[in-house]
Amino acid sequence: MDILLAKHAGYCYGVNRAIKMTLDASEQRGGPIYTLGPLIHNPQVVDKLTERGIFPVEDIHEVEGGGIIIVRCHGIDPKVILEAKNRGLRVIDATCPYVRKVQNKASLLVKEGYFLVILGERGHPEINGIVACAAGEHIVL
């Protein structure tokens, strides 16, 4: 049986960018770094990052002041970023630029008075980030 690998197989741009940002921060820091949730949906990569001193946490309060926290590819509620900065954490925002574009558009549409219909898995981090940015009337389907 022949197995063909697609020419463009592998991680998307946003994931490659987030991994590079995280590894660069790790090399500069020399100490533990934390990601808010797993950086990407790939347990093998998360394990490799953990071996390098990059640990996923579920809440910014798990990180001591002065620590570095990296926002995962899926993005988060902008209020969480502000709270992290106010707690003295250094925030590296690795939100995928395409996800950020959707978050910004959701925010704009709600400000213009639109009712937002979001298609996606309720509770998924990316959807949660979009909902938080929309901060208005919406439904998730």
Image (cartoon, rainbow, N blue to C red):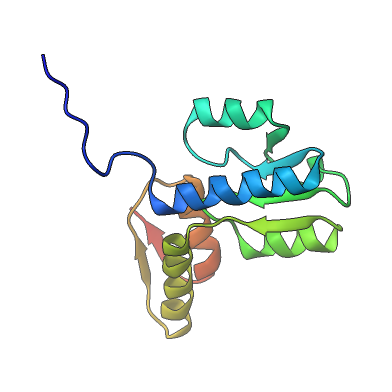
User: Relative to 13, is 88 on the left or the right?
Assistant: right
Q: Residue furthest bottom?
A: 112
- Camera-nearest residue between 22 and 133: 22
In the displayed structure, 62 sits above or below 117; it is above
Can you tell which quarter of the image residue 46 is in?
Answer: top right
Number of numbered discs visible in the structure rendering: 0
Can you tell which quarter of the image residue 11 is in?
Answer: top left
In the displayed structure, 28 sits above or below 102; it is above
User: Relative to 10, is 100 on the left or the right?
Assistant: right
Instruction: Determine the residue positioned at 55% across, 45% down.
Output: 19
Query: What percent of the width, then of the height, locates residue 45?
Result: 53, 31
Query: What percent of the width, then of the height, locates residue 96?
Result: 48, 57
Instruction: Determine the residue positioned at 83% across, 48% down.
Output: 67
Query: What percent of the width, then of the height, locates residue 61?
Result: 80, 45
Residue 59 shows in this picture: no
Q: Residue furthest left?
A: 1
Residue 37 shows in this picture: yes
What is the quadrant of the N terminus in the image? top left
In the displayed structure, 39 sits above or below 96; it is above
Query: What percent of the width, then of the height, locates residue 109?
Result: 41, 79
Instruction: Determine the residue positioned at 72% across, 43% down.
Output: 27
- Camera-nearest residue between 20 and 70: 20
